[in-house]
Structure formats: structure tokens, C-alpha cells
Amino acid sequence: MMIVQKTSLFPASKETVFRKLQQLETLQMIAKPYATFEPVGEAASTWAVGSTSAYRFRLFGLIPYGTHTIHILRFDPEGVSSREGNAHVPVWNHEISLVEKDESHTLYTDRVEIHAGWKTVFIWLWAKAFYAHRQRKWVRLLNGSER
């Protein structure tokens, strides 16, 4: 198992970040072009504790990488805990923490435990780039320059 952790200071209140974090649309926007998530069946537009949802996952929007499931364990203004995975990456345990620095700044941390057998190191390398990209896109979204 390997861990990716990335922290950034976001230019928004914790309340604003949490509100956007609840929306599937935010995940879809911040993941592109590294990954795309297309709901399988009916997908809720927001996540809730205890919910499990499935997505057709494509690397770089082109390479099919199986059905990715997301099971929400915790979802509150302090952060999110999910157990995720697919046939290629069976363990993708994702923790997001939100810490208010002041009324217009939030410390945001992604921490992901990855286990994918012999592929783990390659998935870990991709994930390091993916989470750096995601947090850059978050900042652009919060600054209003990303739609």
C-alpha cells in the first residue's frame, strides 16, 4: 500500500468549499482531463453518508479503466471519508480534510491509500499528479476562472 497526500490553501470559506464538495459536478470538473467519471445508472447529484455510487472511469477521458465505486463513510464540514476502488485498483481509501484558516481561506488536504498489487507504484505516480492537478483546478474554480 502507498499513500498520496496533498494540501493546498484554498481562497474560499470552509462553507463554500464544503458546498461545492457535495456536488458530483465539482468532481467531474476538477478531475478533467486526468479522469472522467460517468454515472452508471441513476446517480445522485450529491453524496450522503452510507451511499454507494458507481461510475465508468476513464483515464485521460479516453482509456476505459473499469467501474469505479465510491462508498461514503463520512461527509461533514470537517471532511469526507470514502472507500473507493475498481477491478484494477481495489483499494483507494480517500480522506479529505477541511480546516478553516480564516473566513476566506480553507486548508484542504487529500489523503489517499492505494493498493493495486504490482500496479501500485504506477497508480501512485499517476495519483500524485492527479491530486496536484485537482487542487489547482479547485483553486481556479474558487477564484471563478473555471466553469
Image: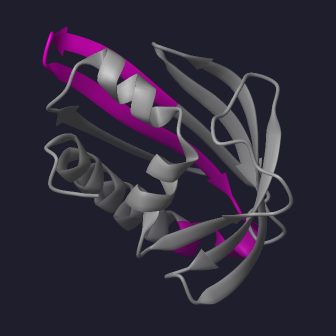
> Which residue corresponds to the image point at 56% horizontal and 79% vertical from the top-left?
59
> Which residue corresponds to the image point at 41% horizontal and 76% vertical from the top-left?
33
State left or right for residue 132 relative to residue 53: left
State which quarter of the image contains the C terminus: bottom left
Point out residue 124 in the picture as x, y percentages from the top left corner: 51, 63
Point out residue 127 in the picture as x, y percentages from the top left corner: 47, 62
Residue 134's quadrant in the figure? bottom left
Which one is nearer the viewer's eye here, 145 or 127?
Answer: 145
- Residue 59 visible in the picture: yes
Above-or-below relation of 101 to 69: above
State left or right for residue 138 relative to residue 77: left
- Residue 1 visible in the picture: no
Q: Is residue 30 on the magenta stretch?
A: no
Point out residue 68 in the picture as x, y percentages from the top left corner: 75, 61
Above-or-below relation of 18 to 138: above
Which one is nearer the viewer's eye here, 81 or 75?
Answer: 75
> Which residue corresponds to the image point at 54% horizontal and 32% vertical from the top-left?
95
Above-or-below relation of 5 to 81: below
State left or right for residue 119 relative to residue 24: right
Kindly report the secondary structure that dominates the magenta region of the rendered protein: strand
> Which residue corresponds to the image point at 49% horizontal and 82% vertical from the top-left?
60
Q: Is residue 107 on the magenta stretch?
A: yes
Which one is nearer the viewer's eye here, 124 or 35?
Answer: 35
Residue 18's quadrant in the figure? top left
The stretch in magenta equals 96-123
State left or right for residue 145 relative to residue 130: left
